Amino acid sequence: MTLLNRFNTALSQQPIIAILRGLRPDAALEIGEALVAAGITILEVPLNSPQPLESIAILAKALNGRALVGAGTVLSPENVQAVHNAGGELVISPNMNPRVIAETKALGLISLPGIFTPTEAFAALSADADALKIFPGELASPAYVKAITAVLPKEARLLLVGGVSADTIGQWKNSPIAGFGIGSSLFKPGLSPAEVGASAARLIAAWQAA
């Protein structure tokens, strides 16, 4: 199975990407295991976390075959190379940088750039992005999503990142949104693995109940 097929399968089974901003390497393994046990198998460690490449390496090795691990806040081709060297498989950015996308695809990784306008969306797709991260998600409404998907290719996949919680995830159930990047309502530095697992379970239950 190709990496893209693995990503597509994981996203269809559980459309939640755990954003582990602030994760420390000494907590990485237990937090990762708690998320996978709860059913979340796509994990993102933002590069503005403490020693992020070390956490990515720990997670990628321990969860190999059970989860996809990558980096967020990836801003340069050099960042992409570092993520690849650490064993990361996903490159997620807050912006749309064609050079970052090109380096990501050249290394065989999954490219998830940030977009908000149709111009950015089409530019990202032209650069061969695998899916589009709507960011900041707090500013996106169902009406906005309906409008932008009306002009995008039908195969374009949209991920909503920012402002999603167990209380709000259900409103997107029948929308074109293919997945969600969820940070503070799922993980904050200092939370125990049990607390993170419980938050993951609440999100999953809310999505399934919607």
Image (cartoon, helix red, strand yellow):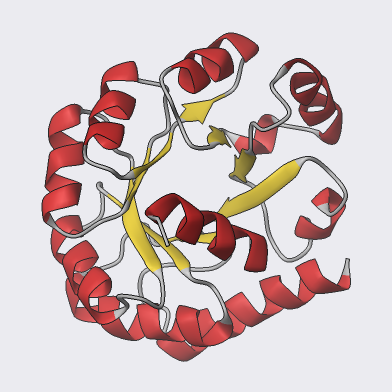
At which x and y percent is residue 169? 76, 57
Report the front residue among 8 and 140.
8
Which residue appears at 56% of the width and 14% of the height? 122
Decide if residue 51 is in sight here. no
At which x and y percent is residue 127? 41, 19
Which residue appears at 87% of the width and 73% of the height? 209
Question: Looking at the image, which residue sits at the far front?
Answer: 1
Decide if residue 60 is in sight here. yes
* 117 relative to 89 in the view: left or right: right
Report the front residue among 159 and 192.
159
Q: Quadrant of residue 108?
A: top left
Q: Quadrant of residue 110?
A: top left
* 143 relative to 33 in the view: left or right: right
Which residue appears at 25% of the width and 56% of the height? 88
Report the front residue among 91 and 45.
91
Vertical placement of residue 137 versus 117, above or below: below
Question: Looking at the image, which residue sits at the far top?
Answer: 119
At which x and y percent is residue 60? 25, 69
Q: Which quadrant would the C terminus be assigned to in this image?
A: bottom right
* 88 relative to 31 in the view: left or right: left
* 198 relative to 86 in the view: left or right: right
